[in-house]
C-alpha cells in the first residue's frame, strides 16, 4: 500500500488495560506498544494514518515502522524521544518537539497522533469491550486504519470493491484462527470413566444375616 507523504506526525502509545504502579508512556507492562503515524493537512485537519504493533520503543523498531509507512523525504514531526534521530537519519526532514519544554499538553503539541490513538482506543473499548488478545490486535488496527482512511468516501461500491480486493490478496484465515486464544492454558485431559457405582456408593456390602440362606 502507498506510504504516507508530506508532513507526518509519528508517536507511540500503549493499548491495554490500566496498570497500577506504572508511570510514563514508555513503561513496560502487560500493555501493547503501538506506533502511530498521521498525515497533517494545511491549514488544518488530518489525512491518512498508519498503525502497527511495535516490539519496543528502540531506534531499530521505530526505524522499521517509519520506513515501512512513511515515504522518504517527508517531514516527520515527533516528540524528543532519543530513539527518533537514529531511526530517522538523513532520509527524512525531522522536526522534534520537546513536549515538556513547550509548556503545552502532548495532545496540543502532537494533535494528529493523539486524536487517532484516542479514536482507536475508544473504538476498541466500545466494539470489543476494551478486551483483546495480543495476537489479534494487528488485525483490529488494520481494520481501524481502513475505516479511518476512507471516512470521507462517498462510494460504497468502491469501498466494497477495495475490501474484496484485499480479502482476495490475503492468505485465507480460518474461523479457528480468529477465535484462538494464544494465552489460553492447557486443560488437563479428563480421566477415563471407571465403570461401577460412584465413589460415594462404592463401599463393602453390609452383613445382613436375615438374608442368608436358611
Image: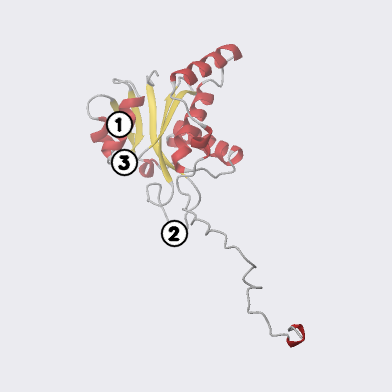
Q: Which mark is residue 81?
A: 3
User: What distance separates the C-alpha of mark 2 from that of mark 1?
Assistant: 30 Å
Q: Relative to 3, is 157 on the left or the right?
A: right
- Circle 2 is placed at which residue position? 21
Q: Is residue 155 visible?
A: no
Q: Nearer the viewer, residue 25 or 80?
A: 25
Counting from the top left corner in percent of width and height, residue 184 is at 48, 50
Q: Is residue 80 visible?
A: yes
Residue lying furthest front: 214
Secondary structure of residue under mark 3: loop
Q: Earlier in the sequence, mark 1 or mark 3?
A: 1
Which image quadrant: the C terminus?
bottom right
Q: Residues within 10 Å of mark 2 (few under 14, many from 20)?
A: few
Q: Nearer the viewer, mark 1 or mark 3?
A: 1
Q: Nearer the viewer, residue 196 or 95?
A: 196
Counting from the top left corner in percent of width and height, residue 208 is at 73, 85
Secondary structure of residue under mark 1: helix
Q: Relative to 77, is 158 on the left or the right?
A: right
In the displayed structure, 118 sits above or below 40; it is below
Secondary structure of residue under mark 2: loop
Q: Earlier in the sequence, mark 2 or mark 1?
A: 2
- Circle 1 is placed at which residue position? 64
Counting from the top left corner in percent of width and height, residue 57 is at 32, 42
> What residue is at 40 percent from the left and 47 percent from the top?
25
Which image quadrant: the N terminus?
top left
In the displayed structure, 180 sits above or below 9; it is below
Counting from the top left corner in percent of width and height, residue 35 is at 39, 35
Amino acid at each position: 500500500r502507498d506510504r504516507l507523504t508530506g508532513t507526518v506526525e509519528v508517536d507511540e502509545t500503549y493499548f491495554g488495560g490500566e496498570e497500577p504502579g506504572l508511570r510514563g508512556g514508555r513503561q513496560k507492562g502487560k500493555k501493547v506498544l503501538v506506533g502511530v503515524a498521521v498525515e497533517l493537512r494545511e491549514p488544518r485537519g488530518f489525512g491518512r494514518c498508519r498503525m502497527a504493533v511495535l516490539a519496543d520503543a528502540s531506534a531499530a523498531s521505530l526505524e522499521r515502522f517509519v520506513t515501512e509507512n512513511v515515504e522518504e523525504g517527508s517531514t516527520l514531526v515527533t516528540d524528543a524521544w532519543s530513539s527518533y534521530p537514529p531511526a530517522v537519519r538523513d532520509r527524512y526532514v525531522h522536526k522534534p518537539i520537546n513536549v515538556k519544554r513547550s509548556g503545552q499538553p502532548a495532545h496540543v503539541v502532537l494533535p494528529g497522533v493523539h486524536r487517532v490513538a484516542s479514536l482507536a482506543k475508544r473504538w476498541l473499548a466500545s466494539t470489543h469491550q476494551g478486551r483483546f488478545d495480543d495476537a489479534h490486535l494487528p488485525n483490529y488496527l488494520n481494520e481501524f486504519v481502513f475505516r479511518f482512511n476512507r471516512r470521507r468516501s462517498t462510494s460504497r461500491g468502491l469501498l466494497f470493491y477495495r475490501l474484496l480486493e484485499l480479502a482476495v490478496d490475503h492468505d485465507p484465515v480460518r474461523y479457528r484462527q480468529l477465535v484462538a486464544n494464544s494465552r489460553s492454558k492447557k486443560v488437563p485431559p479428563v480421566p477415563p470413566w471407571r465403570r461401577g457405582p460412584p465413589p460415594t456408593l462404592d463401599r463393602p456390602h453390609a452383613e445382613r444375616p436375615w438374608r442368608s440362606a436358611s
